[in-house]
Image: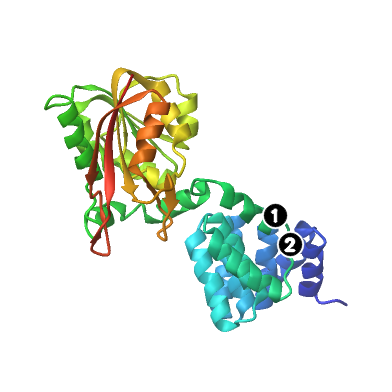
Amino acid sequence: MENPVDLAHDLIALGRPAEALALLEPLAASGRMGPLGQVTMGRALLACGRTGEAVTVLREAAALARDWPDAAVSFGRALAANGALPAAIAEYQRALRLDRACGAAELALAEAWAEAGEAEKARTHLARAEALGEAPVGLRERLDAMQAQARSDAGYVRHLFDQFAADYDTRMRGALAYRAPEILAELGAMVSGGRMRKTPTLDLGCGTGLAAPAFRPFATTLTGIDLSPQMIAQAKAGGLYDALEVGDIEACLAATRRRFGRVVAADVFVYLGDLGAVFAGVRRVLKPGGLFLFTVERHEGEAPFVLQETRRWAHGRGYIEEIAAAHGFDVRGLVECTPRVNKGVPIPGLAGALTPI
């Protein structure tokens, strides 16, 4: 009689994971399932969409078989499916430390870095995976499409900030010396004759709410939008917002019927190259006489915007001036600033204050 684990493996390959689970569950209940059986069961659970259970089973398998690359890769795939992309990448890297010729780990890393918006890293691992005999379907085409996009992948941004939400404020205010909200509040006061008026305020990419203390005193209502559910949860706990929404800022600007007297985007446009859609959206929701305050990281080259090694976009002064005019804004202020530091080095930036014409 064929080994039930081998038979389950074949059933998964045939696209019949539920039947594989039916074979493996009695074996698991008897306590006679080793790491191979656990990995197979975890893969079946994952194929059935039961990602939480798959993570539990495969975590135990990876712990029992620390020297088995396939266990690490399978655990990583479950983590990725459950939304823990950085932890998944760590497991794939561990698999490669165990076996430098593990094609499954190279392919998994290529897919993970593509999901994270890191196209060049994804291409490197894709080439290695193909050299080791893996045959990915559609990944190269996806990477080509990513390269053509002038924005960071939304999945990457969401995963990044979900992972760091808990200690985000400490990191930003500490090692990164983050001051973008204060810079914008000062600029807003300067172009408003010394003090900003109270008005409905929209905080784009609000994160955990670091801009809220600077703008709450000047907001009749304060609304925040962010891609990351974990960041929004932290902002809600702060108690300074009247409304919070999880979503893409461009989509939210295009869909909302609300109008605002002030729109703030502090350290947000580093995840967007082409700012056309968001400027158009802000122009649509901004009331006559309203104020649009934002920061960008600055570059001095001829290109309108460039993707830096940090995976953050930097924009040229000329581009900001041109796109502002194209979308019906008057530039009230566009000043050089240092919104944050990186490893002790000041990051060159621009703080902008625009009003609708």
Q: Quadrant of the C terminus?
A: top left
Q: Quadrant of the N terminus?
A: bottom right
Q: Residue furthest front?
A: 302
Q: Are marks 1 and 2 in contact (CB under 8 Å)?
A: yes
Q: Which mark is residue 48?
A: 1
Q: Which residue is painted at 45% across and 42% down in the image?
A: 227
For mark 1, give the secondary structure: loop
318 with respect to 254 (left or right): left
- Cα distance, mark 1 to mark 2? 9 Å
The quadrant holding residue 34 is bottom right
Q: Residue furthest right?
A: 1
For mark 2, give the secondary structure: helix
Is residue 327 at all visible to an observer of this figure? yes
Choose between 202 and 266: the one closer to the eye: 266
Q: Amino acid at mark 1?
A: Cys
- Which colour style is shown? rainbow
Q: Residue 151, how many percent across, how many down?
A: 49, 46
Reading the image, the residue beneath label 2 is 21
Q: Residue furthest top?
A: 288
Choose between 321 and 174: the one closer to the eye: 321
Q: Which residue is painted at 79% across and 59% down in the image?
A: 19
Q: Amino acid at mark 2?
A: Leu
Q: Which residue is painted at 57% across and 77% down in the image?
A: 95
